[in-house]
Image: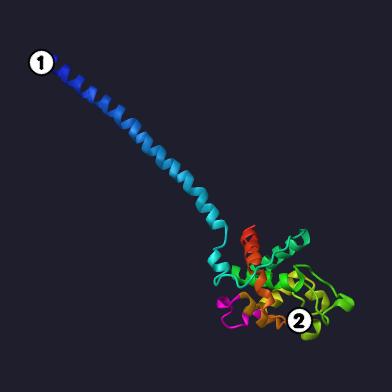
Amino acid sequence: MNTIIRKSMLSVAGLAFAGGVFAGPIAGHNDTATATAAVDAKPVAVVQADKPDTGKLIPHGTQGAQSRIALNDEQTANVKAIIAATKKAGMPERAAVISIGTSLQESKLENLGHLGDRNDHDSQGLFQQRPSSGWGTPEQITDPDYSTTAFLKGLKQVDGWQDMPLTVAAQTVQVSAYPDAYAQWEQQAADLVAQYWNS
């Protein structure tokens, strides 16, 4: 009787051991694969969350040939100021793209003072806004936060601006002599918003 019990116990122990040997590495492999997939998936999700959706930045695609300039520290600081003012106004990334594209055309993102004989009337600042047209004082419109906020207030008054091509939205606010010129800056403006929106 003892021999039968002993053999049965050894058989059960042997099966348990064999099951552990076979189940252990396979289960461990599956756990490792799952853990690796989870680790691999996390950075991708974080990267995606950090960048605005391209579809929101350029919903209609760019129009015509695109221009691009290298930015210095001052211009980059102005990009960040435009984005900060856009966020403060509670407006989406698309508004920042339109604002930056407009400023790229108007001033190459430089906060311009009065240019004397080279000035377009009394236009100044990032958006070449005119004190004589009611945009504010020279001191106000050469303040990036103020000038961006003033531009965004004008943009908010344009019905359907979110669904317009950049050049149409910008021209409706700016009333430029060159209404189609804004379009060429849309890709660089979108790239800058994607780069700095969450920084």
Disc 2 target residue:
135
Horizontal side of residue 2 vs 70, given as left or right: left
- Indicate the secondary structure of the residue bearing disc 2: loop
Q: Is residue 123 above or below residue 84?
A: below
Query: What residue is shown at x 76% (from left), y 78% (from top)?
Result: 129
Amino acid identity at mark 1:
Met
Magenta region, residue range: 154-165
Which comes sooner in the sequence, label 2 or label 1?
1
Outermost top residue = 3
Using the image as rendered, state which of residue 140 and residue 158 is in the foreground.
158
The answer for how far apart the CA atoms under marks 2 and 1 are is 104 Å
Mark 1 closeness class: few <14, some 14–19, many ≥20 residues within 10 Å: few
Mark 2 closeness class: few <14, some 14–19, many ≥20 residues within 10 Å: some
Whether the magenta-drawn stretch holds residue 157 is answered as yes
Horizontal side of residue 21 vs 59, given as left or right: left
Disc 1 target residue:
1
Horizontal side of residue 14 vs 147, given as left or right: left
- The coloring applied to the image is rainbow
Residue 141 picture quarter: bottom right
Query: Which image quarter is the N terminus in?
Result: top left
Query: What residue is shown at x 29% (from left), y 29% (from top)?
Result: 22
Q: Position of residue 152 (x, y in %)?
A: 66, 76
Query: What residue is shown at x 37% (from left), y 34% (from top)?
Result: 28
Whether the magenta-drawn stretch holds residue 190 is answered as no
- Indicate the secondary structure of the residue bearing disc 1: loop
Query: Which image quarter is the C terminus in?
Result: bottom right
